[in-house]
Amino acid sequence: MNSNQPILIVEDSDEDFEVTVWALRKAGVERPVLRATRAREGYELIQGQADARDPASPRLPAPCLVLLDLNLPGADGRELLTLMRSGENPSAIPVVVLSTSDNPRDIEACYRLGASGYVCKPMKLDLFAQRIRDLVAYWFGAVHLPGMVS
C-alpha cells in the first residue's frame, strides 16, 4: 500500500486531523499525508501547488484521495467540491467527506456537488478507527484510483 501519491486531508481541527492520521496509520496506510486547513489551500494542493503565492515553489504530486471536512473557516467543504468538479478541467480525484453532520440535506448536497463518498464521524474513537479501516479497504483495496499503477 506504499506509494508516493499522498492523501490530502482538508481539516481545520488539529485534534480531528491527528486522529484521522492515527486511524489511517492504524489501518496500514504508509503513503504521505498532506494537510490543508482551508478550502483554497486544499484546492492549491490538489492542483499540485506547494505555495500558490510563490511560482517557484516545487510542484507536488496530486493526491490520490481527498478526505474533506465540511465545516471549514471561510469557504467551506462544499465550495471546495464545487471548485474541484467545475471549470474547464474538473478533477477526477475522489473526495470523501468526513463530517459530524448526518443531516440528509448535507449528505445530498455533497453528492450533488460530486463527492465520492460521505462518512459521518462517530464520537467513539474505536468506531472512527473502524470507519477509516473500511474506507481504506475500499479505496485502496477494491477500486482503481486515478493515476495509480496496479
Image (cartoon, helix red, strand yellow):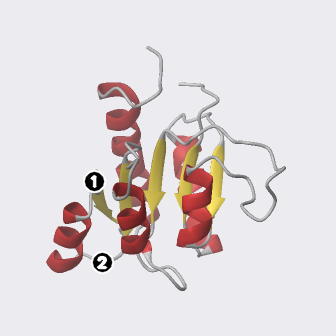
Residue at left offset 37%, top offset 46%:
94
Is 10 positioned to the left or the right of 110 in the image? Answer: right
Is any part of residue 39 visible from this angle? yes
Nearest to N terminus: mark 2 or mark 1? 2
Mark 2: give few (<14), some (14-19) or many (20+) Cα within 10 Å: some
Q: Quadrant of residue 5?
A: top right
Position of the C terminus, as image quadrant, is top left
Q: Secondary structure at mark 1?
A: strand
Residue furthest front as drawn: 88
- Residue type, numbered disc 1: Gly
> Vertical placement of 52 versus 129: above or below?
below
Taking 65 as reference, is 117 left or right?
left
Left or right side of 55 for 112: left
Query: Residue 26: x, y in percent?
Result: 55, 42
Residue 146 position in % (x across, y down):
41, 31
Q: Tell me, for residue 34, which label it has, or none.
A: none
Q: Which disc, if any, is residue 117? A: 1
Q: Which residue is mark 2?
A: 101
Three-letter amino acid code of the residue under disc 2: Ser
Q: Quadrant of residue 137?
A: top left
Mark 1 closeness class: few <14, some 14–19, many ≥20 residues within 10 Å: some
Q: How many marks?
A: 2
Judge depth for marks 2 and 1 and give the one in front. 1
